[in-house]
Image (cartoon, grey):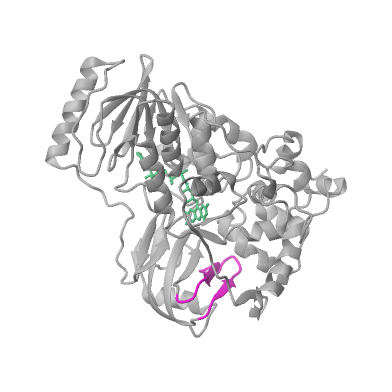
Amino acid sequence: MFNGNGKTNRSTPRHAASRRSALKLGGLAIAGTALGAGLPALAEATDGADYTVRQSYDTIVVGAGLAGLIAARELRAKGRRVLVLEARDRIGGRTWTDTFNDYQIERGGAWVDPKQPHIWREISRYGLKIVADAGPERVLMPTTSGFAEYDPVTAYTRQGELFTPFFEGSQEYFPKPYAPFTREDLITPLDRLSLRDRLDQLAYAPEDEIRMTSTTGLYGAPTSRGSLLELAQWWALSGWNYEGFAGINTYRMEQGTAALANAILADGKPDLKLKSPVASVTQQNGQVKVVTRAGAAYWAAEVVMAVPVNVWKKITFSPVLPQAYRDATTQGYGVPRQKKVWLDLATPTDRFIAEAPEGHPFVIMGRMNENAPVVAFTIDTTLNLASHAAVEAAVRKILPSATLRSYTVCDWQADEFSLGGPAYRQPNQLTKLHRAINQPFGKVKFCGDDIALGWAGYMDGAIESGLRVAGSPTLSPSPAIAPSTRGLAVPNADPKIYRSMVGL
Ligand SMILES: Cc1cc2nc3c(=O)[nH]c(=O)nc-3n(C[C@H](O)[C@H](O)[C@H](O)COP(=O)(O)OP(=O)(O)OC[C@H]3O[C@@H](n4cnc5c(N)ncnc54)[C@H](O)[C@@H]3O)c2cc1C
């Protein structure tokens, strides 16, 4: 994370274990080696903010993001003894409620929606209050000769007209959005298409295509990397229409995502060790041994890996993970390069959204509420985010009269415990890898938003995946995500269109 003064703050500073905790962890490791499998649980003293920690468990959950916290809660409800090992000094993972100039901000995941039934159920379970962003008063859209200003209805009606043909056929190839393999025959040939391929197929006029690359560039990071089927699945999950698709980023939890993470933790009450990055996971003698970088060893009958796919490659698995898991972590699931930036602009002061074509330093920025800082996203690796002048110049490429007072940046790619942003699959990953990496490997199971069957890349996906790995039922899609016949609904696909998409 960069602050406006150019200093870098990692989301998680490395913490050297205190001498006291190092001695204690060392003692546990020795006891674990001596006693081996099937250890009785030994009560241990609490360590700072951590809960009481034993040395052997029914399940060890690695990672205290939303997926890991949900898995831990569900397993505790089934009477299991559960330890959560978390690398950072906080829970929440790629959600992180923080403040910027005394304003509550989210550095990672922020928006939720009733069309996302798993997160919505958690929010109502804990009685968390939802607020809706006020939204923009004006929208700046790119043209071939600069930016043009529109009222929001005009701007997004046109976006709907442009995006609708992009997803033509998705009602046939994703008829059940939470069961993406229902028409495997149709999605297999489509899975090789990138977002760029689909733009090329449709041969949009230049002034239309640049209006779409703000979206495709941000998620695809860049457009040529991202899979068509990931965005098409979100479209399907949104009710196959632009109204649902564009409305996803409207609601937030008033007390922030941290309130949800804390509520899940307090409900499940697993044992929790913060500042405990896991270095190795070894399956032997019918048990799993988990060793942290500090050398503390814990044993369990099973382990749930609730860390991002991108970080699997940083953990030593023994026996080694099968090829599909290694391919997934090498290729990457979490989007590279994406950074979320909060800007304190002295001018302009109104509520706006500005979308820019791919290649601009900021592909989207906006102020959603009165007196709020502006939130912006960048995938530009050449933008010097440590330089106030460079950031202000980047803002002025869209808003020439903007004045930047201060800013703060969260770089999820640079963070060693995420190595990327939210999940966004690349071509061929859905059909070649996704099912395989959802399988347990012996006594090691996997979960996380990256491998969700529904809303991969969203908090809802993290929760769905955490429920599944714990053997708890997931929600079937609520009526709210049934195909919509309102607004900009897509007509049923013409088979000719499908054939032209897959090159038949
Ligand atoms: C910039 C950004 C914007 C987003 N916007 C939205 C949004 O508006 N709406 C939405 O729904 N979603 C959004 N998301 C996605 C959402 O935040 C994620 O889908 C979700 O938080 C992922 O949860 P998870 O538990 O699967 O993974 P994570 O939250 O990444 O949790 C994994 C945990 O594992 C820990 N870990 C990693 N390595 C180790 C190790 N070796 N040992 C121990 N622990 C380890 C990490 O510290 C982390 O706590 C956004 C994400 C980002 C980054």
Tell me: residue 410, above or below residue 169. Answer: below
The quadrant holding residue 64 is top left
Name above or below for residue 439 compared with residue 454. above
Is 207 contained in the magenta span?
no
Residue at coordinates 78% horizontally, 52% vertically from top-left?
Answer: 168
Q: Position of residue 3 (x, y in %)?
A: 33, 67
Q: Quadrant of the C terminus?
A: top right
Q: Which residues are magenta?
A: 350-371
Q: Position of residue 29 (x, y in %)?
A: 21, 26
Query: In the image, 170: left or right of 13?
Result: right
Residue 242 x/y as whole percent: 70, 59
Q: Is residue 370 magenta?
A: yes
SS majority, magenta = loop
Viewer-closest of 345 and 386: 345
Q: Residue at x 56, y 40 (%)?
A: 452
Which quadrant is home to the N terminus? bottom left
- Give the residue at the far front of this rendering: 127
In this rendering, position of residue 323 left or right of residue 92: right
Residue 457 seen:
no
Q: Where is residue 103, by image quadrant?
A: bottom left
Q: Nearer the viewer, residue 323 or 477?
A: 477
Nearest the eye: 130 or 403 = 130
| Residue in the image at 22% along x and 23% along y | 42
Tally of marks: 0
